[in-house]
């Protein structure tokens, strides 16, 4: 199964291929009893952008972004570090090993 690591916590989990990155983040947060700052207000309808994460490694192991996701990312990630490596975690399906960055609080 693909491994997904979330930084800066360094927590790594395995998920079935096809899991959304958002579901993986929820699972990882539960496993370490940490709070990951990932908003989820539109339930995957590509309306809020609160679920967007920077992908540090393995972007090629995620499903490709749709035109609608790219349009959202152009707004949400603009000017942020790693601007070109951001994905909407509710849309990105994990097909191989990935490292993503979440905000911690
Ligand atoms: S949950 Fe709103 S864009 Fe992903």
Image (cartoon, rainbow, N blue to C red):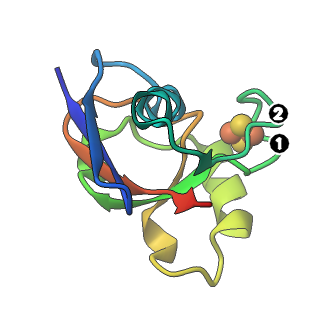
The answer to whether 90 is drawn above or below residue 75 in the figure is above
Report the disc number at residue 47.
1
Q: Nearer the viewer, mark 2 or mark 1?
A: 2
Q: Position of residue 15 (x, y in %)?
A: 29, 21
Which residue lies at the image location 63% right of the left edge and 69% below the top edge?
Answer: 77
Q: Is mark 1 within 8 Å of ligand 1?
A: yes
Q: Is residue 36 left or right of residue 9?
A: right
Name the secondary structure under disc 1.
Answer: loop
Say which of 41 and 94 sits in front: 41
Query: What x and y, as percent, mark residue 83?
Result: 51, 75
Secondary element under disc 2, as helix, strand or loop, is loop
The image position of residue 53, as x and y in percent, is: 53, 55
For mark 2, what is the residue? 42
Relative to 54, residue 68 above or below:
above
Up/down of 86 relative to 48, above or below: below
Work out which quarter of the rendered image holds the N terminus and state it.
top left
Q: Are marks 2 and 1 in contact (CB under 8 Å)?
A: yes
Q: Nearer the viewer, residue 55 or 102?
A: 102
Q: Residue at x 63, y 84 (%)?
A: 79
Disc 2: CA contacts within 10 A as few (<14), some (14-19) or many (>=20) = few
Q: Residue furthest top?
A: 16
Res 61 → quadrant: top left
On screen, residue 21 versus residue 76, left or right, reads: left
Q: Does any atom of ligand 1 lie closer than 8 Å to the CB of label 2? A: yes
In-image side of 102 versus 3 (left or right): right
Whole-Å distance between the Cαs marked 2 and 1? 6 Å
Please provide percent x and percent y for residue 43.
Answer: 76, 27
């Amino acid at each position: 199964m693909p491994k997904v690591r979330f930084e800066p916590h360094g927590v790594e989990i395995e998920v079935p291929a096809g899991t959304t990155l958002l579901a993986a983040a929820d699972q990882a947060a539960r496993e370490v009893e940490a709070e990951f700052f990932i908003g989820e207000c539109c339930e995957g309808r590509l309306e809020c952008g609160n679920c967007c994460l920077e992908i540090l490694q393995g972007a090629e192991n995620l499903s490709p972004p749709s035109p609608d996701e790219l349009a959202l990312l152009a707004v949400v990630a603009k000017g942020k570090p790693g601007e070109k490596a951001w994905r909407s975690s509710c849309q990105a399906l994990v097909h191989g090993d990935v490292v993503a960055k979440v905000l911690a609080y």
